Amino acid sequence: MGSEGYLIHQFLSQRTNRRTDEYGGKDFMKRMKFALDIVKQTKAAVGDSFIIIYRLSMLDLMNSSSDNAGADWEEIKIMAQELQDAGVTILNTGIGWHEARIPTIATCVPRAAFVPITTQKLKKENILDIPLVASNRINDPNVIETILSHQDGPDLISMARPFLADSHIVQKMKEGRSDEINTCIGCNQACLDHIFYGRVTSCLVNPRAGHELEFKKKDQEKAQKGYSRKNIAVVGAGPAGMAFAVKAAQLKHNVTLFDQSPDLGGQFNMAKRIPGKEEFYEMLRYFHTQITKKLKDNITLRLNTRVNASDLISSSASSFDRVVIATGVKPRTPQIPGIEHPKVLSYIQVLRDRVPVGQKVAIIGAGGIGFDVAEFLLHSSNEAHDNDDDKKATSSSPANNVSVNDFYQYWDIDPNNYHRGGLLPNNNNKEKTTETRQITLLQRKQGKLGAGLGKTTGWIHRTHLKKGNVSMIGGCTYDKIDEEGNLHITITKNNNKKTKQQVPEKKILKVDNIVLCAGQESVYDLEHEILSQQQQQQQTSTSSSSLKVFRIGGAFKAGELDAKRAISMGERLAYCIDEDDPQVEDEDNRIKGDEERVADFFRRFIG
């Protein structure tokens, strides 16, 4: 591992290698010696027939003014040749240092963005005889084919997270079933974020990942006990409802999936419209394929259908054994005088209903949704995100249409990888701004806004907003919204660190619109209706409905549109839905699987 700022890579940089012996100094050949010695001694130990793959950083993305922190292209070429001569069998591509303030694998990075200026460029030099591997944000069969068929294309493709999302991705590609691939969306929420929090690695779109032993036991138990096929009504076709319906159908249950909207996806259909989240179209494509094609014999889809308790427990629908409520959440409306003003909008009105928004905007709430709305509003033209052709699987994905050149320009990446570190000189990502609206993002809590965002991606969202000149204010009290629709706030800050004296400041934000992103509330009125009717039947009749009702996803627990939890809950409930007393498993109450118990065991020793 000679890239991403790990130990071997640190020897190559003057910024981190301050040694004065044979392994350091200004001489690049000396700084290479540590890496080459490791390769040579490894080769001597394992023999010529053993494959050695070395990951070489071909684009450091470190500012060239920082003690020559990043390598230049000539040094990369020299290093590649020396590694080949030292015995490396295959050369893999590394991109960036972890300390670099440039995103390299997050979902906002265009697919295969770095291949042209790294692997393809080195291949074009025609100085190596060993195979070259391309890497970073490669998750789609069409992208893979395009890369490999290029005149200067690499010999191999490196993927990691896509195998967490779908371990059968290669088999499906080979069999021409690309529309059935559960695509990695590059969110990092359950893989890298879990690693940095000391949790078992998994995947937002595939909760089985990292929990294979746990789910294998579930499969074995099902095979031993046999399947008791149930007729199940699922109300709500968002992440939780779709995940449950798909797994329940795979387990041979009969599922009727209801949703009052005309499309599958629930609040995914808002997330996909956020610039940088085009990969969410792929989740919708995957579930659409599973529900309407692959599992159509076990799933009856009823969109544009609003159901009530009578529809589910009446004699005409008495075949339902279970009802799963996956009706999600609704925006919480804070108690602020004047909140009914027509200038006040919910995030649903902005993202889903596409209500026009003015140039001066205040956003109340700085969680994930608040940041997403700010990101959405920063883009003066949203036409590129209005593509709703996700009802059918096609070879053209909106994620393929994200401009690589725009990405380079936005992050000051040298499109020719000529300058040292791969960045344009005299640029610290702070000079350029992309302001299209005057946006103020507000939160009640003091401290850094967006503190609860993803461990590995939160800094990217904050950088986007800073580059867009979004004003971020914490410690706010929302006093009122006046007759003109302006927001009156009181800002409280700790002005004296020793005494922690709080000094309030009154302020009026003169805005065109106020967007509410102040949390969510669970929606499960239907459950109350069903239980109420069942109670009435028990009181007035000798026979009553034995229908069992369960809540999952946002209907179970309101949160920041937590698709990771929703999908996991849906899949886990499907495994036990035919039992006498099924239990909804949330992250807070479920029994840990083998992988998690092993991780806990080792964690006790390493602290």
Image (tube, rainbow, N blue to C red):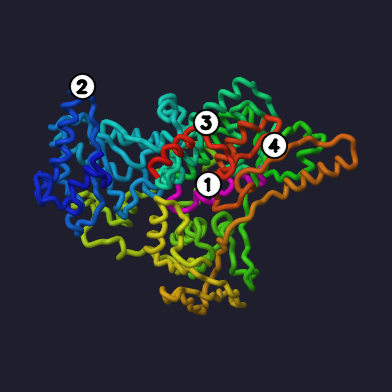
Residue 388 image label: 1
Q: Amino acid at mark 2?
A: Ser
Label the magenta part by its dominant secondary structure: loop
Viewer-side label of 4, 3: 3
Q: Which residues are magenta?
A: 259-278
Residue 21 drawn in magenta: no
Q: Quadrant of residue 546?
A: top right
Question: 9 and 432: which one is in front?
Answer: 9
Q: Earlier in the sequence, mark 4 or mark 1?
A: 4
Looking at the image, tell me whether mark 1 or mark 2 is earlier in sequence order.
2
Dot 3 crowding, Cα within 10 Å, few <14, some 14–19, many 20+? some
Whether residue 370 is visible here, answered yes or no, is yes
Q: Which residue is mark 3?
A: 214
Instruction: Between residue 471 and residue 256, name the one nearer to us.
Output: 471
> Can residue 151 be seen in this snapshot?
no
Q: Is residue 468 above or below residue 13?
A: below
- Percent across and percent down for residue 107 are 41, 47
Q: Quadrant of residue 395?
A: top left
Structural crowding at the residue carrying mark 4, measured as other residues with C-alpha within 10 Å and reported as few (<14), some (14–19) or many (≥20): many
Q: Which of the marked residues, 3 or 1, is nearer the chain's N terminus? A: 3
Q: Amino acid at mark 1?
A: Asp
| Mark 4 residue type | Ala
The Cα–Cα distance between marks 3 and 1, rounded to whole angstroms, is: 37 Å
Disc marking residue 271: none
Q: Crowding at label 1, few (<14), some or many (≥20) Cα neighbours within 10 Å?
A: few
- Determine contact: label 3, label 1, CB under 8 Å: no
Q: Which mark is residue 49?
A: 2
Q: Indicate the secondary structure of the residue bearing disc 3.
A: helix
Question: Which dot marks residue 233?
Answer: 4
